[in-house]
Image: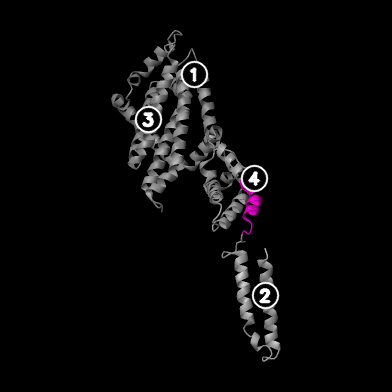
Amino acid sequence: MFLAPLALASFALLTLFALLTLFAPLTLFAPLAFAPLAFALLALLALRCAYGIGGRAMIVNLDRFIEAERPKWERFDAMLNRLATDPWRRLPLDEARELEHLYQRASADLARLATFSAEPEMRAYLENLVARGYAEIHGGRGQTGARWRPGEWFLRTLPRTFRKRVRAFWLALALVLTGAVFGGFALALDPEAKAVILPFSHLQGDPAERVAREESGGGSDRLDGERSTFAGSLMTHNIRVTLLAMALGMTWGAGTLVLMFYNGVILGAVAVDYMLAGQTAFLFGWLLPHGVVEIPAMLVGGQAGFVLAGALVGRGRGPGLAARLRAVAPDVVTLCAGAALLLMWAGVVESFISQYHAPVLPYWIKITFGAIEGAALLWFLGRCGRGKKEEGGKS
């Protein structure tokens, strides 16, 4: 403790001898000509001893130092333990500032103990404490440690991701519409092409005969006891097709393109077939309840495939392939998961509503239900989860 005052006294004497040397006769103070240099060296030595090489205050009494700093270390340790126990916990601003302050103080204390030969256990304890603090503060907790909230994901992340990648959706929609026009014209010009275009046997018969058979069922329920099984099979099949559309994005989008176009061909052929047979009301009552959800879900699967294909092509982008794939992976997974949820709902509706026709379930009720579903889905994908930034800066 006496080294710092000694340094100050040395500087004072150095200044005094410098003044005497300048203003007094040289012969009088000739023996003391080298005194300023001696006192300067003494002062530097005293300062080095007092504050150390790196400017850090030297620990004079180690026990007192540890006793004074230990409560802060223990407080820091307790905060880190709470965060480790509950990794989803969000710190209030005051606690976050305290955590940062305690981390900086522990780091400084470790630096002061680094050249001290005693207390190796204490030094190891501080090293562990500082390492844990560094990992907690600088380890990207906000990016990788955030709790997944299903409600927030469904109401915000999913619709925002859809709008973010909406150009890929428009491409999928354009392909389906093009395929529908082609399929409709092909069937209208050549009715014999139905056996080639439509892959399902129940679609290859006469629409009028099918409608007459469905409407004259006499109230019998052909799905009695099997509705859940039928819904599950519909979900499984449709989700498989949607995931296939996404996976075919690995063909640089060629496979997704073909699948979207082909699904459009089937849709257009079925629509024209029933319209030409004069069964438009049955067509809309049959397809709208589940189709207004199922078809957009299929398009979202194609959207995910084209997003993946865009990352593979990488036109005009600087990062490498691996970086591009990592960048689009969360969006692709979100789109596929969203499409799967929509298809689960569509499967339930198709099994419990779409398969029941007039007079059991009037067509106007089914068409109204489908219109309400379509409006709700349109609002969900177009407006739900919008923030101020998206409202003002939508690209």
Q: Are marks 2 and 3 in contact (CB under 8 Å)?
A: no
Q: Going by the image, does 316 lie left or right of 45?
A: left
Which quarter of the figure has residue 29? bottom right
Disc 3 designates what residue? 241
Q: CA distance from mark 3 to mark 4?
A: 50 Å
Disc 4 designates what residue? 95
Q: Residue at x 35, y 40 (%)?
A: 250
What kind of residue is marked 2?
A: Phe
What kind of residue is marked 3?
A: Val
Q: Closer to the N terminus: mark 3 or mark 1? A: 3
Q: Closer to the N terminus: mark 4 or mark 2? A: 2
Q: Are marks 3 and 1 in contact (CB under 8 Å)?
A: no
Q: Residue at x 68, y 65 (%)?
A: 2
Range of the magenta residues? 59-73
Residue 311 visible in the displayed image? yes
Q: Closer to the N terminus: mark 4 or mark 1? A: 4
Q: Which label belongs to residue 34? A: none
Q: Closer to the N terminus: mark 2 or mark 3? A: 2
Name the secondary structure under disc 1: helix
Disc 1 designates what residue? 363
Number of disc labels: 4
Residue 87 visible in the displayed image? no
Q: CA distance from mark 4 to mark 2?
A: 44 Å
- The colouring scheme, among rainbow, by chain, secondary structure or one colour, is one colour
Q: CA distance from mark 3 to mark 1?
A: 29 Å
Q: CA distance from mark 2 to mark 3?
A: 86 Å
Q: Residue at x 69, y 68 (%)?
A: 5
**Which mark is nearer the camera, 3 or 1?**
3
Disc 2 designates what residue? 11
Q: Going by the image, does 325 lie left or right of 386?
A: left
What kind of residue is marked 4?
A: Glu
